Amino acid sequence: MKELLTYVAQNLVEHPEAVSVTETQGDGETLLELRVAPEDMGKVIGRQGRIAKEIRTLMRSVAQRKGTRVSVETERRRDLLPPLFLSLGRQAGKDYTIMKNKFLEAGQIVNTHGIQGEVKIVPWCDSPEFLCSFSTLYIDGAPIKVLAARPHKGNVLARLEGITDVNAAMRLKGKTLSIDRTGVELPDGRHFLADLMGLEVRDAESGAVLGTIHDILTPPAHEVYVVRGGSKEYMIPAVDEFVKEIDVDGGFIRVKLIEGMASDV
């Protein structure tokens, strides 16, 4: 199943080398988490999430033939994209405080560049320039100094302290890079994805709890919040017309629903 999803995704995107699939065994179900380069997200999502739905349908059909269950999700590492959200969920009737991760995943080393130890990084943030602004990144929790970094065709080429040849750079291939959020100031109305995913979603008119943000799609026009609650899934465009309030500290958002947003899962 993992190999099939990888094959399908690699044939849809412009950067097949950045495609990765993580397989996790759950309670009677296999979870496949798909990661692609940020600029390729629209290609695996499609207009109104149609391609993503087709991929999920294909994988579920194959799984059923094998007598198994599978769930396909797009990765959640786009911690820095605007104006996204991530929370830790909320138990009904209980108070809770949002716990913000100090370190946020911001990119992945996908290859080497040249023979002097430079690495090619696919950024998981607003722009390559944003990632280039950091003098220190983190690999597996350990800090590594950035000696030089520059944007290159939507990616980042960087020289890291202690990495002086292609062999040393190759050993970092596939490593995830994180940033320390304490030094980042976001404009009003923009949030770290890691602070918002899982937020409780409430109907702005009735106050009813619809579910939590399960995923965030990033097609070219605007983000789409995938909300799941019970047997329902809601696809809510992240625009002012439908998103009426975002309260990260309170752990919820309020949305306006219209016909066609809800579907059975």
Image (cartoon, rainbow, N blue to C red):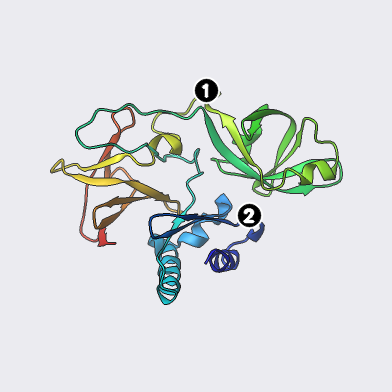
Which of 31/243 is in front?
Answer: 31
Q: Amino acid at mark 1?
A: Thr
How would you rate the neighbour count of disc 2 (Cα within 10 Å): few for under 14, some for 14-19, many for 20 or more?
A: many
Residue appearing at x 26%, y 47% in the figure: 211
Query: Residue 57's image quarter?
Result: bottom left
Compute the Cα span from label 2 to label 1: 28 Å
**Residue 18, which numbered label?**
2
**Measured from the top left, where is residue 164 in percent x and y?**
85, 36
Classify mark 1: helix, strand or loop: helix
Instruction: In the rendered view, tell whether residue 128 sits above or below residue 264.
Output: above
Q: Is residue 119 left or right of residue 17?
A: right
Query: Residue 72's image quarter?
Result: bottom left
How would you rate the neighbour count of disc 1 (Cα within 10 Å): few for under 14, some for 14-19, many for 20 or more?
A: few
Q: Is residue 190 left or right of residue 233?
A: right
**Residue 182, which numbered label?**
1
- Residue farthest toward the top in the current orientation of the protein: 183
Residue appearing at x 80%, y 35% in the figure: 163
Which of 131/16 is in front?
Answer: 16
**Measured from the top left, where is residue 183 in percent x and y?**
55, 22
**Measured from the top left, where is residue 37 in percent x and y?**
58, 52
Residue appearing at x 47%, y 46% in the figure: 76
**Measured from the top left, where is residue 61 in percent x and y?**
41, 74
